[in-house]
Image: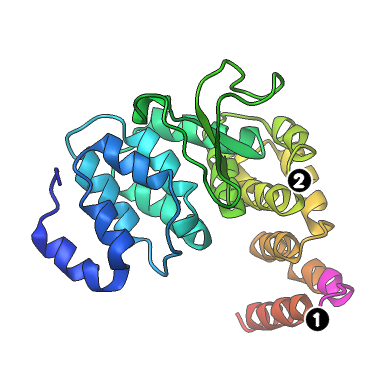
């Protein structure tokens, strides 16, 4: 291994990560790590090893963004992707330009297209399980129809929330631009994109913010409605939030908002 991480880190993690995790941490080069990340591995209950992988291999070497793209779309950490993206940001190894590019890519399509030819030699093709796959080049209407070896990587919905929030905060895309993308995304991915926009509601122009809030209040996904109701309360309108929640079909929404508005009334 290269970088700041030493034997102590590997020894501490080895017992929890098993053979696959030790193999990743022991990768002798960035390309070897990326080849391993393009193959299957067991799901993790922690993302500390993924953060360590980025620190280890990119403390001095360039290319952190490319490795981060693989880590974030790896099934090993799929259930932890929302936490992992913030952890990778905290490493400081991704520049603002890197993070802006990553946010736009995570919003652009249902799949992240990873060009894999640089990490394989001799035209090696690997059959990947699950949603990931390697192709000699997708159909002509996909982003990489140039005959190159690519891996199509599933983008976990929580990454859309982070990406949308960054896109709004950094003025990478307008609210209308983001709404235009929603029709191309699966339902949960679209909902998480809206949640990310709601997270940065105050960053938007007033008219766009109001339109977004009204849309989110009526969104089919419970998590989006809750986020919008929370913002209503934070903006000083707990009465309206309580009225809307009282009519919500989901009992957990009614209970959550009821508890929060009760707390607000005490102050």
| Residue depth check, mark 2 versus mark 1: number of the one nearer the observer | 1
Decide whether residue 249 is among the magenta residues: yes
Which is more N-terminal, label 1 or label 2? 2
Provide the residue span drawn in magenta.
Answer: 243-251
Q: Position of residue 214 (x, y in %)?
A: 82, 51
Q: Residue at x 24, y 54 (%)?
A: 25
**Residue 133 sits in quarter:** top right
Q: Dots 2 and 1: beta carbons under 8 Å?
A: no
- In-image side of 241 versus 162 (left or right): right
Q: Position of residue 94 (x, y in %)?
A: 34, 37
Give the quarter of the figure containing the C terminus: bottom right
In this rendering, the answer to whether 246 lies above or below 206 is: below
Q: Residue at x 60, y 46 (%)?
A: 160
| In the image, farthest residue toward the top | 146
Q: Secondary structure at mark 1?
A: helix
Circle 1 packing at 10 Å, graded few (<14), some (14-19), many (20+), is few
- In-image side of 198 versus 80 (left or right): right
Residue placed under numbered mark 2 in the picture:
212
Q: CA distance from mark 2 to mark 1?
A: 24 Å
In this rendering, the answer to whether 172 lies above or below 55 is: above
Decide whether residue 61 is among the magenta residues: no
| Of 239 and 177, the residue lying toward us | 177
- In-image side of 22 versus 139 (left or right): left
| Of 8 and 207, the residue lying toward us | 8
Q: Secondary structure at mark 2?
A: helix
| Of 217 and 267, the residue lying toward us | 217
Residue placed under numbered mark 1 in the picture:
251
Q: Residue at x 50, y 55 (%)?
A: 75
**Residue 183 sits in quarter:** top right
Q: Position of residue 218 (x, y in %)?
A: 84, 57
Circle 2 packing at 10 Å, graded few (<14), some (14-19), many (20+), is many
Give the colour scheme shown: rainbow
């Amino acid at each position: 291994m290269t970088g700041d991480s030493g034997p102590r880190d590997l020894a501490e993690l080895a017992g929890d990560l098993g053979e696959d995790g030790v193999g990743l941490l022991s990768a002798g080069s960035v390309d070897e790590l990326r080849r391993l990340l393009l193959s299957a591995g067991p799901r993790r209950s922690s993302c500390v090893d993924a953060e360590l992988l980025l620190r280890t291999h990119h403390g001095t070497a360039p290319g952190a963004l490319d490795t981060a793209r693989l880590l974030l779309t790896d099934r090993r950490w799929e259930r932890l992707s929302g936490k992992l993206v913030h952890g990778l940001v905290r490493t400081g190894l991704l520049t603002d330009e890197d993070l802006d590019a990553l946010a736009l890519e995570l919003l652009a399509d249902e799949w992240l297209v990873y060009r894999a030819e640089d990490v394989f030699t001799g035209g090696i093709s690997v059959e990947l399980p699950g949603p990931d796959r390697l192709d000699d080049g997708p159909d002509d209407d996909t982003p990489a129809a140039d005959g190159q070896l690519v891996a199509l990587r599933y983008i976990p919905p929580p990454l859309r929330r982070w990406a949308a929030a960054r896109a709004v905060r950094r003025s990478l895309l307008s609210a209308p631009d983001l709404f235009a993308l929603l029709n191309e995304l699966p339902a949960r991915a679209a909902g998480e994109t809206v949640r990310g926009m709601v997270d940065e509601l105050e960053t938007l122009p007033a008219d766009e913010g109001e339109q977004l809030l009204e849309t989110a209040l009526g969104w089919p996904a419970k998590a989006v409605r809750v986020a919008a109701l929370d913002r209503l309360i934070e903006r000083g309108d707990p009465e309206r939030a309580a009225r809307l929640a009282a009519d919500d079909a989901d009992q957990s929404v009614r209970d959550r908002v009821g508890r929060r508005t009760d707390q607000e009334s005490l102050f």
